[in-house]
Image (cartoon, rainbow, N blue to C red):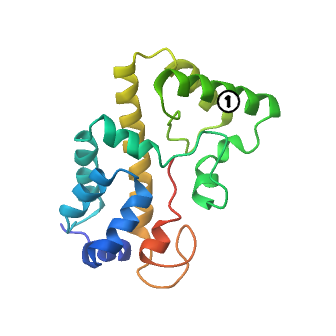
Amino acid sequence: MTSTPTPGLTWLNSAEAGEVRAALHEVCASSAWGERVLARRPYADTAALFHASDAAMAELGADDLAEAMAGHPPIGRPKPGDPASAREQRGMAGASEELKAEMLELNLAYQERFGHVFLICATGLDGEQMRDAVRERLGNPPEREREAVRSELLKINRIRLTRLAQAPETGTETATGTGTGAEAAATHEGA
């Protein structure tokens, strides 16, 4: 049985490489990941897209992972003017000032220990769950933490790719905002 590609997946398969590259960069800031996903077009369905994304993520080295993480703001401090960033961190929106202050301290301690922001797929998590995760992961050795980050990026990328694949091809309201192509991809959810 074959499935009919969604409008967003049809766009992903047929749009010019530069437009798709820009949309993929909004999913994951790693250039190497984006080029690998772009090179494997066309995709029959989202499962094939996920497979390509996961394979590309598995191939990323330390510098590529650092580039991917650079596209994510610290938990509790979404990027100003970025609706996706605010949506992704919605679990911190109702947190107490005490919890927000504690998260700031934990984020700083994490960044000092590992040299990058604490990255977690925050979709569906509340502030306490995120706090508990950063506390736990602060004890990881660097090698284990690098793989934890890779695992979180896999989850984030799948969420964002789902939104990209489901986005309407032309000018109507999308699941994340208005617009098409790279403009629509710029508002996708994830971390």
Locate residue 60: give its quadrant. Answer: top left
Q: Position of residue 157 (x, y in %)?
A: 39, 50
57 above or below 178? above
Locate residue 128: give its quadrant. Answer: top right
Q: Which residue is mark 1?
A: 103
Q: Amino acid at mark 1?
A: Met
Q: Position of residue 3 (x, y in %)?
A: 25, 69
- For the question of whether residue 5 can be seen, the reply is no
Residue 164 appears left or right of 21: right
Residue 42 appears left or right of 187: left
Q: Position of residue 155 (x, y in %)?
A: 41, 44
The residue lying toward the viewer, choosing from 167 and 27, is 27
79 above or below 99? below
Residue 66 appears left or right of 39: right
The residue lying toward the viewer, choosing from 67 and 170, is 67
* Secondary structure state at the residue bearing disc 1: helix
